[in-house]
Image: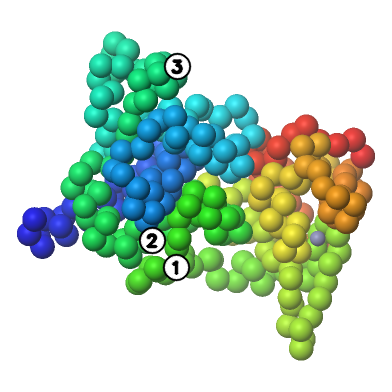
Amino acid sequence: MTTRSATDLERGIREAVAHLRTWKRGERRAPHKPLLLLYALGRIQAGAPRLADFVEAESCLKSLLERFGPPSKAAHPLYPFWHLQGDGLWEVPRGKDAARRGGHAPLVSLARELHLEGGFPEPIERLLKRRPVLVSELGRAILEEHFPESLQDEIAEAAGLDLTAQGGAKRQARPPGFREEILRAYEYRCAICGFQALLDGAVIGVEAAHVRWHAYGGPAVVENGVALCVLHHKLFDLGVLGISPGRSVLVSTRASGEAEASARMIPFAGRRLRSPQEGKQAVGEAFAGWHRREVFRGPERAA
Ligand SMILES: [Zn+2]
């Protein structure tokens, strides 16, 4: 392969990865293909064979979807395993025989029974193996496009992907001023528990959270932000916590923990979210509603 064609191929891969975005259905979260790609990039780093057995991929993807997918009934792992082929980044060599008429995905039971295999097409796999930095860059790009920053490292780890070989990749810049504006509006306190701390005068442990994710068109405005301590920010992005239409705190019945952990979650159920300073807009229902539908893992605990 000449240098020229490797460059073209690399550009093609980057474009295909970026264009997964067109698969986002409006405001609905559709992380299936991104999670499959992260899993596949992790396999490249691990030196695994090019093709993954569907049965093996299924259990890993299922757990990724349960942890990081939308709370609504998610598509089956076979969905991305089959349909990623349409993006030119994936192939299922023995798939044709198993596919139903009209190119529809084979039945899950058949995919399991036949141990269908899928993976990057050979030229892509060769390039990725030669360019570890490209693997990390693609992983980072996928995470930034589809998930909030607070979850990116955790998802990479769960997908078996090491992002330390960053090369020239840069984290996507956050809109300037958003963090400061949110923290100031909430007087540098967590809007759920009130945590506030300083180190030599600088705020520590309190962050500006997007309610509707930046990756899903959530604007960098005060109405779409809330100041949360590090723990509550993480729990909010994972869907353990949510915001009701009346702006009280929702806590998922699906989260549990020992006494100390429970004490940091359960007592807040039904409590009012702290309001921002006078003159600053509280969290907008349009954004809180998106978060309840696409992130919060109901049902909620009774107050
Ligand atoms: Zn807090």
Numbered disc 3: secondary structure: helix
Say whether mark 3 is within 8 Å of ligand 1: no
- What residue sits right under mark 2 in the picture? 136
Q: Which residue is mark 1?
A: 164
Residue 270 or 150: which is nearer the viewer? 150
Labels 3 and 1 touching (C-beta < 8 A) = no
**Crowdedness of circle 3 by 10 Å Cα count: few (<14), some, many (20+)?**
few
Quarter of the image with the C terminus is: top right
* Amino acid beneath label 2: Ser
Disc on the earlier residue, 2 or 3: 3
Label 2: few (<14), some or many (≥20) within 10 Å? many
Q: Residue 293's spot in the image, x, y percent? A: 66, 35
Asked if one can make out residue 215 in the rendered structure from this viewpoint, the answer is no
Residue at horizontal 40 percent and vertical 30 percent from the top = 54
Q: Are marks 1 and 2 in contact (CB under 8 Å)?
A: yes
On the rendered structure, is 158 left or right of 204?
left
The residue singled out by tag 3 in the image is: 109
